[in-house]
Image (tube, rainbow, N blue to C red):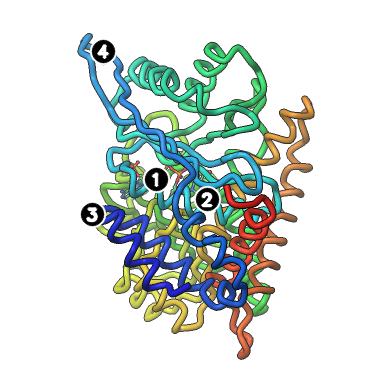
Amino acid sequence: MKVQEVLNDLKRRFPNEPEYLQAVSEVLESIEEVYNQHPEFEKANIIERLCIADRIFSFRVTWVDDKGNAQTNMGYRIQHNNAIGPYKGGIRFHSSVNPSILKFLAFEQTFKNSLTTLPMGGGKGGSDFSPRGKSLAEIMRFCQAFMLELWRNIGPDTDIPAGDIGVSGREVAYMYGMYKKLARENTGTFTGKGIEFGGSLIRPEATGYGNIYFLLQMLKTRNIDIKGKKCLVSGSGNVAQYTCEKLIQLGAIPVTLSDSDGYIYDPEGITREKLNFVMDLKNIQRGRIKEYAEQYGCKYVAGGRVWAEVGDIALPSATQNELNGDDAKQLIANGCIAVSEGANMPSTPEAVAVFQNAKILYAPGKAANAGGVSTSGLEMTQNSMRLSWTREEVDEKLQRIMSDIHEQCVRYGKQSDGFIDYVKGANISGFMKVAKAMMAQGII
Ligand code: NDP
């Protein structure tokens, strides 16, 4: 494989998909050497078969708003690769959603799911519908209309969606309710469900907690204690909230949070009580993070990014490409020692290069945020067995999985000077398992 040739070809075929090309380029560059040691991969054209999704569904979603007017949105489901298990990945509702963003997410998901040690393939879906500013009844009608189109193409052994940006337990419940009505089954074709109808304990917490479990493993390689470390967290949704919760439990000090309008900086630290305020503000009141600054009298920067502040550890937990090369330089200049990604592809390629050149601890999302989908895998297991594990059982399994993922990154990413290249480690490890499964199953 010549990476540049493959990339040029993909650019020609998918010219308007920058996020997809960015994700593919990062993976191909880091697996090139290993791939070229396996001529059988080249003959079977594993690379193109792995970069191009198995299939993509796109559909119109029509729903009625509160004024009685018909509205339309686009809906998508990308079934990327099912070599090691059924397609698995979240659904995103955000006005920015387009095929490029979902294709990058589904591609990344395939490697992430491979790393989890559980048998799950990769997928992703979503819509350019934004729940922001919509009434509960509008959100429900939209979720039902979305499912009316998608339900035939998903199932407990074929494709199991979950939440993502703009899709919390509330939206999952509406979609799952409609799915059950149409499919007439109760097999758990969705993860992130409510605890009363098949959901798993710790699933809401899993991505944020998992990211911190991974961070702890990284810090251990350099004998660094997390206690007392100032942490810059971006976002204020599911991942950001439970990242803060775990940091507080461990004695670290989260000092920032953000949303798409701006960020807050609280030098005193976000405490348990303040986090409760954020959870109520974001999950119940559906308010803006600015209100935190009004409540606690701290700094609010409209339109700014949290990376301008001083912190020991950065935990991007909002969205893709939210941290660029200049932000990365600023973080390093301010003494940042570790970056662990809760979001998917939050750092641009320039930012990743800055972190790696500075040889700080840097974990890409596909390793660090894999706790979410891992716990979704555990939810699937519990649904199949028709029983529920305790919080402690799920948390213990989550910790073990994050530690396994860290170990795989070290195995494939340790350089001759001892530096651990977590990007390379995660990509090679995730790739090898999927490639071997594809080879074993023939040319299909
Ligand atoms: P939520 O919808 O709960 O929260 C998203 C947060 O990010 C909100 O604070 C939102 O602000 C902010 N945000 C979203 N888009 C933008 C944007 N374009 N610019 C600036 N801020 C933005 O989503 P999650 O917390 O679930 O997801 C966050 C990230 O983590 C995503 O990258 C997701 O793919 C990833 N992830 C999530 C997992 C999960 O289990 N939920 C699992 C693995 C990865 P606002 O409210 O203003 O839109």
Amino acid under label 4? Answer: Asp
Frontmost of labels 3 and 4 is: 4
Separation (CA) of disc 1 from disc 2: 10 Å
Frontmost of labels 2 and 3 is: 2
Amino acid under label 3? Answer: Gly
Separation (CA) of disc 1 from disc 3: 25 Å
Q: Where residue 292 sits in the image (x, y, percent)?
A: 36, 45
Asked if residue 249 shows in the view, the reply is: no
Q: Name the residue beneath numbered marker 4.
A: 66
SS for callout 3:
loop
* Circle nearer the N terminus (1, 4): 4
Q: Name the residue beneath numbered marker 1.
A: 102
Q: Name the residue beneath numbered marker 3.
A: 303
SS for callout 2:
helix
Mark 3 Cβ inside 8 Å of ligand 1: no
Residue 156: which quarter of the image? top right
Asked if residue 331 shows in the view, the reply is: yes
* Circle nearer the N terminus (2, 4): 4
Separation (CA) of disc 2 from disc 4: 36 Å
Residue 199: which quarter of the image? top right
Amino acid under label 1? Answer: Leu
State whether residue 167 is above or below residue 442.
above
SS for callout 4:
loop
* Circle nearer the N terminus (3, 4): 4
* Circle nearer the N terminus (1, 2): 1
Residue 342 horizontal side relative to residue 322, left or right: right
Q: Name the residue beneath numbered marker 2.
A: 109
